[in-house]
């Protein structure tokens, strides 16, 4: 039996658009704080607001974008978001004060939040239902590759050629996201009824309840992931492995690339529990090995295990959020999942920073490994047990109908 086609032109286009979107994000994420501190003589706390303001505006804009997707259609929202995102990228050349940069970050975050919601919804509609786990895994690889390439390119640009080249590069990449977005032919096939479109604006219309439980699990795990993003390079310097610090996320991405064809198919064949529980354990083991690392081998081994563990969990959780929602609510479900997930990243960046001031990074990552295992308990109660109950109820209803 032939499988439905996954690698369509639209799937490739939306994955490339997502790659360029996140590449712009990561290029600026690692460079703007140092830029405003050195060029604008700002404090570290104000420099940290570069990321905080961006993420908060993305979080706030996503639920609104999710509702707009349901009403206006995917392509219109995507192109509007990418125009805002590319337009905001052009503005980085002009401000000379920290407040000016914060305004641009606010606008940029709105475009980013809308765009990530739109591409996540479009790809969920494009991927055949029988290959959704596999397809979402490949799609998320575009984000992972941007995470590896973006910081490297951004730091190289600002260190070797200066901020003007850095900002020019971010504009070019953002325009790349817009151009690849324009090539997407997919349009939403399921539109809500006229009565639903005219329904009143409400909290329920902004959030998809079915996506909240798994989003909470993802947000819980994201706190640990934020500890990696923020401090793994500093930790590498602390344990005298600065020369291989840049390889951490390279190994992370390579392991993801190798494992993706298998993990995605297993998710479709056997369901999320067969994937999630082992990957939570691998994530925890990877963090434990990282906490005990004293040499190159164990440091990079931890990167591979974390890549296989967390790198597989994130697309699995996003797939669950989409599958549990009605087809026409996928946009809102995507927005709900990503908003709650990014809240975990933002909260984690703050909390982990506070905790890291009280203990060394080795101890921090050691405790994180046990924190992750508690996430398995959270996953069981918020997803596994709930799904088992729903399945039981459906079976009972089927028996009643047969009688």
Image: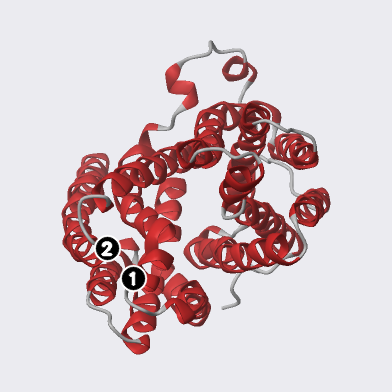
Q: Is residue 394 left or right of residue 334?
A: left
* Closer to viewer: mark 2 or mark 1: 1
On the image, the x and y values in percent for residue 250 come to 52, 76
Where residue 283 sits, quadrant-wise, is bottom left
Closer to the chain start, of discs 2 and 1, is 1
Q: Nearer the viewer, residue 335 or 172?
A: 172
Q: Nearer the viewer, residue 325 or 393?
A: 325
Task: Name the spot of residue 24 as percent of width and height, x first.
Answer: 68, 53
- Location of residue 327 in the rendering, given as x and y in whole percent from the top left corner: 53, 41
Q: Secondary structure at mark 2?
A: helix
| Left or right: where 204 falls relative to 286 | right
- Give whichever of 64, 368 is nearer the camera: 368
277 sits to left or right of 164? left
* Secondary structure type for disc 1: helix
Where is 333 relative to 300, above or below? above
The total number of labels drawn is: 2
Location of mark 1 (residue): 238
Q: Which residue is mark 2?
A: 361
Q: Position of residue 189 (x, y in %)?
A: 68, 41
User: Residue furthest toward the top?
Assistant: 200
Q: Are marks 2 and 1 in contact (CB under 8 Å)?
A: yes
Residue 259 is at least partly visible in this image: no
| Residue at the spot 83% in from the left edge and 52% down from the top edge | 179
Q: Left or right: where does residue 140 sit relative to residue 272?
A: right
Mark 2 nearby-residue class (10 Å; few <14, some 14–19, many ≥20)? many
> Does residue 228 show up?
yes
Distance from the alpha carbon under mark 2 to that under mark 1: 8 Å
């Amino acid at each position: 039996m032939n499988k439905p086609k996954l690698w369509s032109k639209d799937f490739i286009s939306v994955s490339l658009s997502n790659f360029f979107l996140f590449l712009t994000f990561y290029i600026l994420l690692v460079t703007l704080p140092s830029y405003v501190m050195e060029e604008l003589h700002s404090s570290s706390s104000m420099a940290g607001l570069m990321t905080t303001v961006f993420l908060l505006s993305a979080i706030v804009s996503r639920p609104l974008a999710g509702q707009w997707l349901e009403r206006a259609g995917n392509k219109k929202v995507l192109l509007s978001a990418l125009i805002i995102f590319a337009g905001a990228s052009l503005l980085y050349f002009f401000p000379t004060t920290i407040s000016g940069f914060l305004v641009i970050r606010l606008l940029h975050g709105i475009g980013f939040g809308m765009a990530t919601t739109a591409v996540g919804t479009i790809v969920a509609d494009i991927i055949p239902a029988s290959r959704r786990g596999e397809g979402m895994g490949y799609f998320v690889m575009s984000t992972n590759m941007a995470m590896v390439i973006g910081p490297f390119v951004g730091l190289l640009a600002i260190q070797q050629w200066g901020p003007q080249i850095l900002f020019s590069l971010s504009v070019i990449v953002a325009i790349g996201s817009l151009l690849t977005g324009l090539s997407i032919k997919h349009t939403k096939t399921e539109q809500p009824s006229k009565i639903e479109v005219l329904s009143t604006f409400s909290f329920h219309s902004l959030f998809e309840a079915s996506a909240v439980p798994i989003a909470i699990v993802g947000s819980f795990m994201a706190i640990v992931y934020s500890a990696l993003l923020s401090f793994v390079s500093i930790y590498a310097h602390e344990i005298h492995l600065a020369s291989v610090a840049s390889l951490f996320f390279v190994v992370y991405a390579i392991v993801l690339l190798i494992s993706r064809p298998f993990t995605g198919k297993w998710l479709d064949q056997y369901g999320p529990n067969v994937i999630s529980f082992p990957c939570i354990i691998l994530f925890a083991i990877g963090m434990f090995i990282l906490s005990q690392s004293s040499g190159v081998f164990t440091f990079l081994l931890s990167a591979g295990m974390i890549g296989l563990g967390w790198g597989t969990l994130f697309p699995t959780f996003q797939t669950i959020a989409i599958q549990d929602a009605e087809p026409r609510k996928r946009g809102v479900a995507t927005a709900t999942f990503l908003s709650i997930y990014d809240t975990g990243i933002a909260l984690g960046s703050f909390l982990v920073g506070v905790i890291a001031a009280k203990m060394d990074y080795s101890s921090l990552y050691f405790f994180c490994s046990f924190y992750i295992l508690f996430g398995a308990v959270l996953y069981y109660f918020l997803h596994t047990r709930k799904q088992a109950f729903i399945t039981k109820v459906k079976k009972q209803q089927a028996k009643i109908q047969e009688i």
